[in-house]
Image (cartoon, coloured by chain):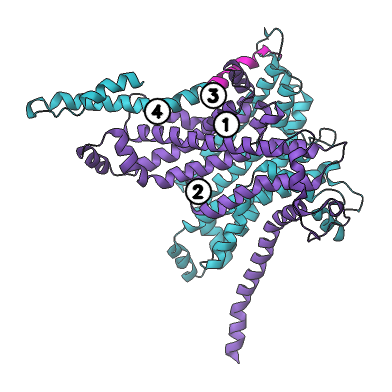
Chain colours: A purple, B cyan
Amino acid sequence: MPNTVRTIRSSLPTAAWWTVCVCLAVAFVYPLYVMLAMALKGPAEQGLIPPSLVPHAPGLENFRHLASVQGLNVFGNLGNSVLVTVAATLGTVVVATLAGYALARARFPGSNLVFFVILATFMIPFQAIITPLFMVLKTLQLNNSLLGLTIVYITFNLPFGLFIMRNAFATVPMTLEEAAQVDGCGVFSALRNVLLPIVLPGVITTALLTFFASWNEFFAALILITDQDKFTLPVTLTLVSSGQFGSINWGSLQAGVALTIIPCIVIYVLLQRYYVSGMLSGALK
Amino acid sequence: MTSTTTPLAGTAPARPGPAARHRPRMRASRRRQLVGLAMAAPAIVLIAVFFLTPLLLTFWISLHNWPLMGRRRFIGLENYTRALADTNFHTALGFTLLYTAVITPILFLLGLGLALLVRRRVRAAQVFQSIFFMPVCIGLAAGSFLWLYLGQSQIGPLFDLLRRVGLVGADDNIFASRWPALLMVVAMVTWKVVGLQMLLLLAGLQSIPDDVLEAARIDGAGRWQSFLHITAPLLRPTLALVLVFSVAGSLLAFDQFYIMTGGGPSNQTITAVYQVYRTSFTSFKLGYGAALSVFLMLILAAVSAVQMLLLRNSDHN
């Protein structure tokens, strides 16, 4: 008898822990469920008061409607987002890897100053320099262009990527590279064949952080792009939500939100390990 | 750049004889420097053109009356003196501070709570940790549009929940009054970013050696006592980091208010960045907008300085 009492008493905290955790998990997932449910609801069901929890007749009508919201092609804008994000991710990875290697391994006079200045840009919010950035882009005829936006995203993500890549290269033993050079490798082939596989986690982390930052970026895209057909997805949503004749199609808006969020969730689930460690290493330094 | 490295690359394979070993090595190290410079060049150019130039331009523009079109005029510090007396800017700054003051303790306490919850060394704890962290990867804009629907009058599911428990009336509009709108934004941002705070605090908690807590337990310290006297002080660098993350993020808030409240009702939820945006891109007063930006930078620099101070003090203990 005292044994069962003890069992109950010791399992009580565990039961409470499970209850709290499950409740919280439901609360965290609930908005995403609501988004999906609304995106799949038909026009008649969208305006129900109170809203239905489960769609009665789920369909893709809201997604189809996105192709023709008031002269706006949301799928074209989805393509813009993919283009800018992929280009910015590749660009950041290449530029950060090259510079990270240089600053860790092939130092030159002034390389410490370069690293210091690039780190110092961490302290300055890009929101504060957006107006002159707009003017610089205009001078270079890169305003209102996806190429210009891509370059801006590469620049914004560079300090972080460079920091990660420099640290990644700094941990590789020097002897490994020397051995490769004795075997006749040049700097670039040693970098590609010997070092790159070792710093791959850093590369993945840089790529992931740039991907999420560019895919989700709103403020710069809102200001630097003015043509509707060049909008990226998050900015497009402002037009979907501004509504036709003053009434908003909430189903289509949630379909657009789902298009924006689902790729992030998929990539998060697949590459969680790298993302989490990257966030930590970036924050804790 | 390539023209300087190619001829040197051509000389590299020549094997140095024992007598001539000294000179090629000098050349090799010089060559390595040049290669390094060439490899760092794209990063240097990007940062110089698209970050440092706009940064310097911000200060230059802020000294001018600089409309989008038409003639600009040097006016010295007039934009700054004007900003100091601008009630719209004061209101925006005040609201930004209010938002920061509301959300920072919420994020911190919830983040700490979640970190303590998922600290258990069981597999389920890791699964819950992944779930709580998931919204971090979602964009602030997408999250705002999602929660705009959640809290929408009558048709929003969260509105419906709040109505059922009696927190809002059936005809209320959450986004039409200041505090409810602010709290809705706070709820959205908490959902989106608290996972990061949890993660940082968890890393801080795990860096505290178990034997220190074990020793305290043997000495008769209760759970609460050891948390207060051992965990909390050792956690101080992490606390400083988490606080700065949330303060800096909140001071720069824009997306969530632009999307969820549009700055309304009657401009009561305009943040500092939002005010800069309106000044530069709605009123096209670029010079004045730049001066406001400089104030923003100064405030954030002060936050960074406080962080350094907090971190340094924790080293002494």
Q: Are labels 2 and 4 on one chain? A: no
- Read off the residue under disc 4: B40
| Percent position of residue B39, x then y | 38, 28
Q: Amino acid at mark 1?
A: Ala
Q: Amino acid at mark 2?
A: Leu
Q: Are marks 1 and 2 in contact (CB under 8 Å)?
A: no
Does dot 1 land on a helix, a strand or a loop? Answer: helix
Determine the CA span between mark 4 and mark 3: 16 Å
Picture disc at residue B3:
none
Determine the CA span between mark 1 and mark 2: 22 Å
Mark 4 crowdedness (10 Å alpha carbons): few <14, some 14-19, many ≥20: many
Dominant secondary structure of the magenta stretch?
helix
Q: Amino acid at mark 4?
A: Ala
Q: Earlier in the sequence, mark 3 or mark 1?
A: 3
- Read off the residue under disc 1: B301
Label 3: chain? Answer: B
Q: Is residue B173 above or below residue A188?
A: below
Determine the CA span between mark 3 and mark 1: 20 Å
Q: Farthest bottom residue?
A: A1
- Read off the residue under disc 2: A280
Q: Amino acid at mark 3?
A: Phe
Q: Earlier in the sequence, mark 4 or mark 3?
A: 4
Q: Are labels 3 and 1 on one chain? A: yes
Q: Please tell me whether residue A169 belongs to the stretch shown in magenta.
A: no
Quadrant hosting residue B66: top right
Instruction: Write the start and end of the magenta stretch as one range.
Output: B53-67
Q: Are labels 1 and 4 on one chain? A: yes
Q: Earlier in the sequence, mark 1 or mark 4?
A: 4
| Percent position of residue A185, x then y | 25, 37
Between B84 and A279, the residue placed more toward the observer is A279
- Read off the residue under disc 3: B50
Q: Are marks 4 and 3 in contact (CB under 8 Å)?
A: no
